[in-house]
Image (cartoon, rainbow, N blue to C red):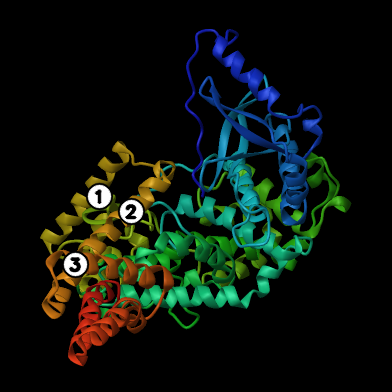
Amino acid sequence: MAFWTAPHLVRRTNHAHRTAACGTILGLALALGPASGGAQDRPLVVLTDTGRTCDGLPVLAPHPAGLEINRALSRGFSGRLLRLYRLEQVFLATRGGPPPEPAYLALTSNQGGFPRVGFYLGEEEKRQTSYVDLHLRQDLTGRFGASDQIFPHELAHIMLSRLIGPPGDGGSNQVHAVGVRTDRIIALHEGFGEHVQIMAVDDPDAEPTTRALTTDRVRLAQVDRNREAYLRELSARWAPFSRMRMTFPFWFSGTEQVWRYHAVRADLFGRQPRIPEHLLSDGDPYEAYLIENVLPGRPDDPPKPAARMLVTEGVVSDLFYRWATDSALQDAYRDNWFYEPFGTRRADVSPVENVYLKMIYAFALGRPADARAAIACYEQAFPDEADALDRIVRDVLLGQAVPASPEIWLANPAFRTGTTLFDQWRSQPRTHTFDLNAASLVDLLGVPGVSQATARAIVEGTPYQELRDLRRVHGMTPGLYSTFERMAEEMRALKQRGSDSEASVTIRSVLMPYLRKALTALALAAALGAWLYWIIGRPRWFRAVLNGAGVSVVVLPLAWLGGVSPLVALVVPVVIFGMPGGLWRWRSRGAVGAGVRILAAWAAAALPAVLLSSAFF
């Protein structure tokens, strides 16, 4: 995750006086782990959460397995970034920044990963010190999204924010993901963090099981199947409780981590996924929105416009990855005077470190707000490398130049998206916001009164210097233009009100809508199944209810978690329940017809669950 958080700063009239409770907590923290002496000499200090707070800050203590974790995260690219983190701090100290400190990693019960600011370590208050917060049960190595990739991702956020400041409000009202079109600010920070994950997997000194991920074709094939199954369900005309959407939290996170490597390296988030025509004509383009923001394109899909690419973090991630690994930029060393403020010498800097030190220098001077400005800062600082960087940028933007268009943000209350992509049915809806100059057909078709022809004309007419330029678009009536003006006003009001951050998204808020959806599907399937069983089998009503509920409890998990075909989902309860009942009826009464009727009743009882969990047309 990528949301920069700082604990609430508690106002105190006398900083020197702490409460007795706070002192007790600090004593407990010291007792939980070995002393932290010598921590300043280590590049990484691993901490654990005591579960206590003091003055609004979490109290952390040395982790009992800190040395083992330190060894795992001090190799490969994670170790290289720790060295760069130290060099950056030395450089910033020469510009009036605080003295260098180790990198701090806190293993907590918080889901995901976060860059944070402020904590207590023993009796020492570190209110302005940054640290990485990772979940305590996360794998260290050996899978996409393990700590040896997520830790440097979050450390990269800290490094970038020290240079240019933490991300502000860029306009997007959607929680980010690798394929989501957000805004220029989020895309810069998240793209910079995510490219580090690729570097971590590719690093020649990475842990062997992490390096092996690059050739894991079995996992990649499963991810491709997930993509096609999800696309098929979103494109279907009938898919009320379909498998991939009902199990989205269970497959998407792992799949997205694989896409952060393979799809980003192939620049597939720079390509526009093809959207079925009927999804663009249905009035509510939410399924089309999901296709556009969840899925990477295919290699033969058309490029997205450059303005939209630079607000998609998967594209910005590819930009930084190619930037950091380009041999021309790596080999362009500067004179020794350049490296002295970093506390090192040219001879001690590796080629990949050379690129990052130049980024640090350029970003500290220019403080870029987005990827476009980051490119300009670097080229201004190192004009002799401008041609090489321009080549990389054009390659990433699939032959397009960096757009110079301004941002024109609009908020459309008539079109709601989920709070996150995990909110597949918009149980926690958010007003959709978008930049007119980076808008897609889907963004525009959600605006009341915009036809496909008008939406295409608006996209083709970009860039716009101001909103009133829309008046020249073919099909733009005075009434429709007034709608766009109202959306601009709504955007200003939305920014004044503010919106919830991703820190407000909890496991409960993500999973509860799925539980409610599953219970709804179960109730519908059980009721319809009981009715069909009663019509065909003619049992007593309570037996029909039990059988309808029982078969639904079997079929729905088979369809959602087992991934079986509709035919198999229909046959399984007939074999488990129907055949024993039919054989008993045939043997006890000697009537073949009675046994067949029992089989048919069970098949009919299973049919509603099969239909509700399937995608058709």
Which one is earlier in the sequence, the residue at label 2 or at label 3? 2
Say what secondary structure mark 1 lies in: helix
Q: Quadrant of residue 204?
A: bottom right
Question: Where is residue 321 shown, x and y percent of the image?
Answer: 63, 63
Residue drawn at (61%, 59%) of the image: 195
Question: Where is residue 468 shown, x and y percent of the image?
Answer: 24, 56
Q: Nearer the viewer, residue 558 or 324?
A: 558
Q: Nearer the viewer, residue 249 or 404?
A: 249
Q: Which mark is residue 543?
A: 3
Foreground mark, 1 or 3?
3
Q: Residues within 10 Å of mark 2 (few under 14, many from 20)?
A: some
- Does residue 247 lie above or below 75 as drawn? below
* Left-right relation of 285 to 67: left
Residue drawn at (58%, 7%) of the image: 17
Which one is earlier in the sequence, the residue at label 1 or at label 2? 2
The answer to whether the residue labelled 2 contacts the one labelled 3, judged by CB atoms less than 8 Å apart, is no
Residue drawn at (21%, 90%) of the image: 590
Q: What residue is pinned by disc 1?
A: 488
Say what secondary structure mark 2 lies in: loop
Q: Nearer the viewer, residue 345 or 423?
A: 423
Which one is earlier in the sequence, the residue at label 1 or at label 3? 1
Question: Where is residue 30 shown, x and y percent of the image?
Answer: 69, 23
Q: What residue is pinned by disc 2?
A: 408
Badge 2 amino acid = Ile
